[in-house]
Image (spheres, rainbow, N blue to C red):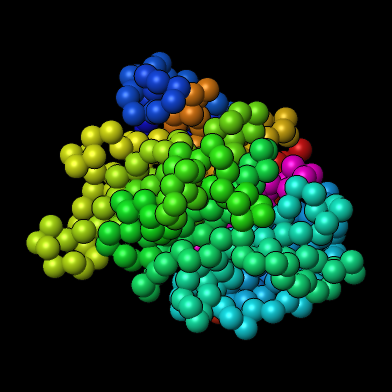
Amino acid sequence: MTRLRWTTTAACALTVLAASAAVPASSADPSSSASSPSWTRTIPALTVETVASGLDIPWDIAWIDSTRFLVTERPGRLWLGSTEPGVTLQRVSAGFADLNLLAPGGLLGLTVDPRFATNRIFYTCQTHKAPNDVRVIRWRLSADRRSAVRVGAPVIAGIPFQHSHFGCRLLIMPDGRMLVGTGDGALPKAPQARDNLAGKILRVGLDGSVPKDNPWATSTGKRRFVWNYGHRNVQGLALRPGTNQVFNAEHGPDRDDEINLVLKGRNYGWNPVDPSGSGTYYQSVPMTDLVKYPNAVRAAWSSGFPTVATSGLGFVTGPAWGEYAGAAFVAELKGSGVMALTLDAAGAVVASAQVPELDDAYGRIRTVQQAPDGALYVLTSNGGRADVILRVTPVA
């Protein structure tokens, strides 16, 4: 896989030039590669408009119907928005008094129940105080959409943390199970300890049950919720349209942010244990340690050095997107932009490039999600009430 160069054609479109694209040896695990011929693509220009401003670290966005969406704000605010022109954000009253606001914690991931039209249920992932943990909360939005109340016990709780690396992205799969991407909580032994919920991708029923086909479903420990392990800080989860492939984005230490193909029961190789035996959280280790764990899943894409702080992840589809259609868009916090990744049928990344209209233009980017109408919604993460929600559409 090579980084793409962008040049402008006479028609004012963008031409992508790629060489030595990597393809996998196996459709189950993109851990081997070979070269393929170079190719050229023409990418549509994009229009970017600001649809909301004055926010303070909006973290996630999810649609409740074809035009309305919810947005979480990390300090503990929930908003209702609309894709209709001129409609401003409306505050949704909800109880967040138990949020642990130790940065970068707070109100984080968000997803909507597949039966929202009849049950008005949605879910948030948030850091909690007394006890300190990360948990997934079930909510019901009121009929007038002005307030929300908690419903029942947490879907899952007890995801530990020390002082950072909270995750926490949510994804409901077509089978009705929820994937929960967690951070390692800055706990050195957590990522490789399968009975610890930190540094994992979890899989849980929407009622909090353990799916019978989880890899360790018959265990009596917490590993019964674990789908895979060995992660540092999962920030993005997305299902590739038209497939059963799920990808995650996660932060590396000072190198090697990763995009990974999510596989059942596998180890992703992060083990921040000090080899001196001090017991401290030690990050001068490989993001995917193939010496210690030779069967660990290799990243589909890795930043190398320096990192860009990969965050939210989403796919764009539809003919209006031209050659972008089917690409994964990856939000970059430190990189202050959005990266487009082209994948082959097996899920290997064959090319990457920055989306020029969003590159170094709006500061840190937290989340990218495609709306039901095909537009891409982008959340910035600059803080100080300087954040915005952007709507990105291809030029007709």
Task: Say which quadrant the N terminus sits in.
Answer: top left
Magenta residue span:
363-379
Picture coordinates of residue 390 (x, y %)?
67, 58
Report the residue that reaches farthest toward the right. Answer: 144
Q: Is residue 367 magenta?
A: yes
Q: Tell me how many marks there are.
A: 0
- Going 52% across and 22% down the picture, which residue do you hit? 345
Task: Say which quadrant the C terminus sits in.
Answer: top right
Rendered position, 1 above or below 129: above
Q: Is residue 26 at least partly visible in the picture? A: yes
- Going 24% across and 65% down the picture, which residue do you hit? 281
Rendered position, 38 above or below 60: above
Rendered position, 227 above or below 93: above
Query: Which one is nearer the viewer's eye here, 327 or 61?
Result: 61
Picture coordinates of residue 215 (x, y %)?
46, 39
Q: Quadrant of residue 334?
A: bottom left
- Going 56% across and 48% down the picture, which residue do you hit? 210
- Going 46% across and 76% down the picture, which residue do you hit? 132
